[in-house]
Image: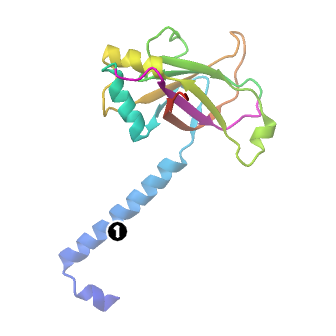
């Protein structure tokens, strides 16, 4: 090994070392991003990038030009880990509204929908162990496109806001979010 390195100039060795360091950094950075838990709590809304396929991006580009077929819609799917804890929060979902909070009304044009989580020990103990919440996001996306808040190629974010199930309820549970996806749905004829 030492003889092989002797063929390289000191500049080449320095470049090789820099390359190795960058590769190591990218590997560690990628692993840390993959392993970061996305946890929603009652006091901290969670802003997440929305993953979408090319066909969804195409559908989004049609929204602003009013060419989206009436038989097509775009669904937002949120995958999360079930909870066995009591007092789980309800969740409100907003697009491209990072400052959304519990005080943001559902009449806000960025509002998509809400969902509730109930303790589910049987799902939490299963091998699949995921809850999928699917909601129609078409109207919100059209509204944002018409307002100029949705542009082709721009990232789309979902802000998840935890709210108490009842005004006086004390929410102690948190919610781990796995994925936030947009999917194109075409009506069956």
Which is nearer the eye, 110 or 183?
A: 183
Q: Is disc 1 placed on a helix, strand or loop?
A: helix
Residue found at the far bottom of this picture: 3
Name the side, left or right, on which 10 lies relative to 53.
Answer: left
Residue at figure coordinates x 69%, y 21% from the top left: 171
Residue 77: x and y in percent read 56, 32
In the rendered image, the quadrant that contains the C terminus is: top right
In the rendered image, the quadrant that contains the N terminus is: bottom left
Question: Where is mark 1, residue-wise?
Answer: 20
- Which stretch did the figure color magenta? 67-85
Residue at figure coordinates x 28%, y 72% from the top left: 16
70 lies above or below 186: above
Q: Identify the image quadrant of residue 176.
A: top right
Residue 13 in sight: yes
How many C-alpha atoms fall within 10 Å of the one at disc 1: few (<14), some, or many (≥20)? few
74 lies above or below 22: above
Q: Specify whether residue 11 is painted magenta.
A: no
Residue 128: x and y in percent read 70, 46
Q: Identify the image quadrant of residue 165.
A: top right
How many labels were placed on the picture?
Answer: 1
156 lies above or below 17: above
Q: Identify the image quadrant of residue 167.
A: top right
Image colouring: rainbow
Which is nearer the eye, 49 or 132?
A: 132
Residue 42: x and y in percent read 61, 23
Residue 90 in sight: no
């Amino acid at each position: 090994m030492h003889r092989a390195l002797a063929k390289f100039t000191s500049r080449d060795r320095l470049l090789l070392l820099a390359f190795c360091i960058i590769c190591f950094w990218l590997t560690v950075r990628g692993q840390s991003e993959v392993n970061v838990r996305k946890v929603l709590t009652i006091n901290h809304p969670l802003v997440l990038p929305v993953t979408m396929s090319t066909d969804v991006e195409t559908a989004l580009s049609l929204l602003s030009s009013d060419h989206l077929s009436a038989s097509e819609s775009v669904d937002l799917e949120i995958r999360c880990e079930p909870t066995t804890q009591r007092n789980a929060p309800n969740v409100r979902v907003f697009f491209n509204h990072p400052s959304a909070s519990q005080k943001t009304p559902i009449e806000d044009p960025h509002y998509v929908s809400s969902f509730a989580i109930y303790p589910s020990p049987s799902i939490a103990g299963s091998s699949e162990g995921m809850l999928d919440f699917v909601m129609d996001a078409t109207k919100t996306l059209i509204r944002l496109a018409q307002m100029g808040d949705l542009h082709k190629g721009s990232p789309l974010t979902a802000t998840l806001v935890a709210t108490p199930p009842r005004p006086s309820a004390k929410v102690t549970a948190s919610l781990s979010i796995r994925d936030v996806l947009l999917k194109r749905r075409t009506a069956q004829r």
